[in-house]
Amino acid sequence: MLREKGNVKTAGDAILFQLKSLGEAQAETLARRLGISVQAVRQRLERLFAENLVAYSDRAHGRGRPRRLWSLATGAGSLFPDTHAQLTVDLIGTIRNELGETGLARLLERRREQITAAYSKRFAREPDIARKLTALADMRSAEGYMARVERLGEEGFLLVEDHCPICAAATACQGFCSIELAIFQNLLGPGWRIERQDHLLTGARRCSYRITPQPDVSDQ
């Protein structure tokens, strides 16, 4: 299992994290982002390829040589933590059997309240929406989501989560995904609209959320 992103010790780990975030990339791009030589990156990629952790595809690019794009191999997914996956899935099944869907829904609502309360303390300390979202991404990354914020034009934002540490649980009970969206909307308040754009459970390589100002109905 890989270390957390902030504590990466090897160039190989760093490359795997970059590919997890980017989806696919050339060796030159990886070298630039990591601050090491292209030759060093290529050597690491060859080792990772031999270990069945990365794959590549060569794509035509004009009249020159094809571009070699690297990506994570299927087997690399197990290197990124899925927090207590089987135990969580088993517990969800037990709760369903013992308490039914209504009981499971109550527990999910309690989880939503607890997470919202925890995030709100940090969220409230930040002076503007950009810093609030950066703080949210930091908190999510600390939990294993590999989160970051991207700007969309002058006012919009994209919250990106390149990994889901509770993917097994979310697959067993998609209520986990629903409460996350509700948590984010509650934190942002009525002045902002949040929509899920990408969803790991529907086949996307990441989860992402588009955040834009909510028009004031009174001004329309």
Image (cartoon, rainbow, N blue to C red):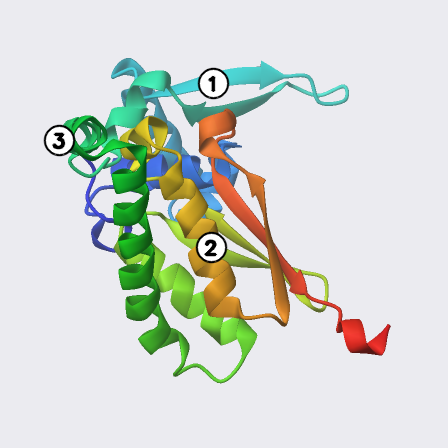
Nearer the camera: disc 3 or disc 2: 2
Q: Is residue 207 above or below residue 135?
A: above
Q: Quadrant of residue 62?
A: top right
116 on left or right of 128: left
Q: Marks 3 and 2, how far apart in space?
A: 25 Å
Q: Nearer the viewer, residue 215 or 137?
A: 215
Q: Nearer the viewer, residue 83 or 150?
A: 83
Q: Residue at x 51, y 58 (%)?
A: 149
Q: Which residue is mark 1?
A: 56
Q: Which mark is residue 182?
A: 2
Nearer the camera: disc 2 or disc 1: 2
Element on which disc 1 rests: strand
Q: In the rendered structure, which disc, 2 or 1, sits on the residue that comes first in sequence?
A: 1
Element on which disc 3 rests: helix
**Residue type (three-letter) at the residue carrying disc 1:** Tyr
Element on which disc 2 rests: helix
Q: Quadrant of residue 17?
A: top left
**Residue type (three-letter) at the residue carrying disc 2:** Ala
Q: Which mark is residue 87?
A: 3
Q: In the rendered structure, which disc, 1 or 3, sits on the residue that comes first in sequence?
A: 1
Q: In the rendered structure, which disc, 3 or 2, sits on the residue that comes first in sequence?
A: 3
**Residue type (three-letter) at the residue carrying disc 3:** Leu
Q: Could you tell me residue 81's position as x and y percent?
A: 23, 37
Q: Marks 1 and 3, how far apart in space?
A: 34 Å
